Amino acid sequence: MAAEGAGAAPAERREAEISPERLTPPADEAETPTDAPVPPPTGRFGPLGRPLGRNAFVTGFVGGLGVFLAYATYAAVRNAAGMLLLIFIALFLAVGLNPAVVRLRKWGVPHGLAVATVALGIVLLLCGGLFALVPPVVNESTEVIDNLPGYIDQLNENPTVRDLNERYDIIQRASSAVTPANITRALGGVLGGASLVFGTVFRVLTVLVLTIYFMAAFDRMKEGAYQLVPASRRQRVRLITDEILTKVGAYMVGALAIAILAGTSTYIFLIITGVAYPFALAVVVAVCDLIPQIGATLGAVVVSLVGFANSLTVGIACVIFFIVYQQIENYLIYPKVMRRSVEVSDVAAIVAALLGAALFGVIGTLVAIPAVAAVQLILREVVVPRQQER
């Protein structure tokens, strides 16, 4: 009996420890069954409908719609590739010119006036380049047209040309080639050239206007893009992106400084040697020098050909000058400027320029070095630390 009483006491104690509050569920849980359907969320335009059933028809329809949308997107991008390229160029120029706007704002200039000042500087540079290049081209073309009869007379006095004319009747064939159909075809070619000129002017104006708009709204665009990043990573993305944009701007400033130095040196050399149109040729060298790796060579070839047209001595002097100057630029000026601005190795710069030229032409060559700088920064600040944590 004592054993039974001892065994019953713990049982009674355990039953006493279980309070009625623990046995009775809360009022909300008692009133709402666990298997009751959850009401759909109600939005501004009423409650959401039930999701579609996942049957074969719905799956196939959604898959086909996805394929159609993907092809429509591809076709739209392909058709708008030219305009998208102009937008990309304008955005790249806006990123590169934004440090100038920021510097003017630090000096107390209002934002709108700073953007207008930078835009006016760009317009003045374009106008200066046009005024330097157009008059020599027009003058040379006029001289060729005026001297064309004399060139023909000189050809007729040549015994070889006279012999060919007697054998193959070249003059008569040339006269018969001048027919109304050929004139119409030539007129179409002239109209095609005019269309090319107007198209180029339209593209330049489009890039200029878009660049000004992007510079004016640069801060708003950047902050709007940051809002799309999760709040937990926004600060780090902001810091890395600002550093990338700073490197792009530094690259643009460095490239412009190197190009201006190349053009100034060429102008002084052409003045000393007495080559015609030195300012126009200096502008050509400066513009070509903006193209990494191959631009300086292109400008040197153009100026050297003009030098050989003047005289053999001047042509040889031009070749020697550009060989010496390019060695100085490649091994002294360019590495110091770019190493301080974008911190890209020479091997990476060469490989990036070659790949950029193969993929996107001249635009790819211009964007290659800043892109490599951005990739290196992301690898160093994001990828490598993640690998170290594993």
Image (tube, rainbow, N blue to C red):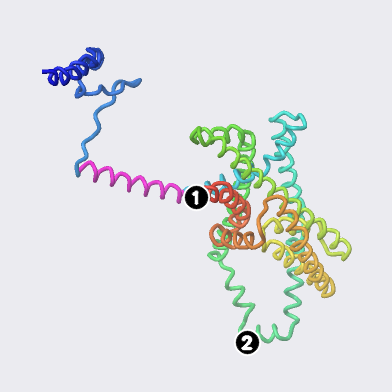
- The secondary structure making up most of the magenta span is helix
Residue 349, placed above or below residue 206: below
Residue 179 image point, x, y percent: 56, 67
Give, as a three-letter code, the residue at label 2: Arg
Farthest left residue in view: 1
The residue closer to the viewer here, 342 or 188, is 342
- Residue at 35%, 45% (x, y): give it: 69
Question: Which is more toward the observer, 378 or 342?
Answer: 378
Mark pair 2, 1: CA separation? 53 Å
Q: Which mark is residue 81?
A: 1
Foreground: 251 or 125? 251
Residue 63 is covered by the magenta coloring: yes
Q: x%, y% of residue 95?
A: 63, 42
Label placed on residue 167:
2
Q: Is residue 220 magenta?
A: no
Q: Which amino acid type is shown beneath numbered disc 1?
A: Ala
The residue that appears at 20% across and 19% down in the rendered structure is 10
Q: Is residue 295 above or below residue 203?
A: below
List the single residue furthest toward the front: 2
Other-residue count near label 1 (Cα within 10 Å), few / some / many at <14 / 14–19 / ≥20? few
Determine crowd level at label 2: few under 14, some 14-19, many 20+ residues with C-alpha closer than 10 A: few
Disc 1, SS: helix
Please give the range of residues in magenta: 57-79
- Pick the front one: 129 or 157: 129
